[in-house]
Image (tube, grey):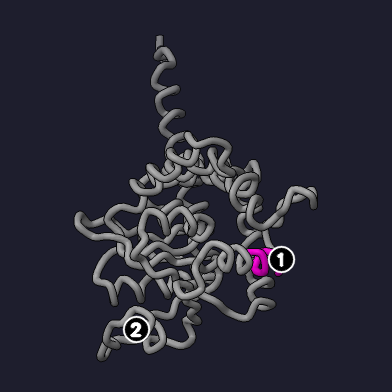
Amino acid sequence: MGQQASKPEPGKTVQVIGAGLPRTGTASFSQALAILLDGPVYHGGTQTTIGPETNVLSWIDILNRAPVRSEADRKYIDETLRKVTAGYVGLTDTPNHCFVEELMDIYPDAKVICTVRNPDSWAVSIDKLSNTVTKGTNRFLRFALFLVPGLRYFHDYIDLLNAGRWGELYGPPDEGKVYIHGRAVWDRHMEYLHRVVPKAKLIFFDVRGGWEPLCKALDVPVPQDIEFPRINDAEATETFAKAQVRKGLLRWAVALGAAAVMAVGTIPAVRLFE
């Protein structure tokens, strides 16, 4: 997860569609793209949680129509995706990697780059992320985050993602469940990419390789005297989650305190001395 939300810039257009799953170095990848392409990058996990509330609401609208059931759904998804991603040079992380096919139609000249790591270690990491997300959708945390813009809709967003496009791609209906995590997600994501992305267009990138392989893929010079960004996605997500819960509880404390003061102010004055 990135450290702060990116802001779109007029005139910028998407040059890279990040097709990598979460926990594959997407935060480092995002910052690297921002440096190389000189523009803002839309990191899905960051934008849907601490970006303007319109981000998560737009994705909720999109996910309400995926899987696609009609031509009207398809048209709505394309139009909304175009609006959400306008002004960025790159798109990474969830839910972007679930809409690679649609994004290629919108940005036919963009490169498709899938960040990768060891699939088995990824499965362990995504299991931990799944536990964090599950905790984030329990009743207490729904209450705690209700006063935090964007995050108040987080459980709705996750529910729709799992029941919709994520489940469509990674949890076939005949198995009777949605695979939120596990090696099966990795394998099915790779199958999805090989099915929808032309072989010559699909690029795989391991962030441990640093600047050179990424610059070669983008046909840009290697930055001089700039270290490749190294962000631990797992630590960043955990730190972010704890900070947002504290923020939410503090806002509730302030709101309830203010309500108590107002309530006391409405009590009729009592004559202590007569």
Circles 2 and 1: CB atoms closer than 8 Å: no
- Decide: is 176 above or below 235: above
Q: Residues within 10 Å of mark 1 (few under 14, many from 20)?
A: some
Which quadrant of the structure image shows residue 169? bottom right
Query: 210 or 101: which is nearer to us?
Result: 101
Residue 79 drawn above or below residue 213: above
Task: Report the disc number at residue 215.
Answer: 2
Q: Is residue 195 left or right of residue 54?
A: right
Q: Residue furthest left?
A: 11
Residue type marked 2: Cys
Q: Position of residue 254 (x, y in %)?
A: 43, 40
Residue 139 appears in the picture as rendered: yes
Which region is colored magenta?
Answer: 183-188
Q: Could you tell me which residue is drawn at 41 percent across and 86 percent down? A: 213
Q: Residue at x 33, y 46 (%)?
A: 83
Could you tell me which residue is drawn at 65 percent across and 45 percent down?
Answer: 163
Mark 2 burial class by Cα count in 10 Å: few <14, some 14-19, many 20+: some
Report the residue marked by disc 1: 184
The image shows residue 187 at horizontal and vertical percentages of 67, 69
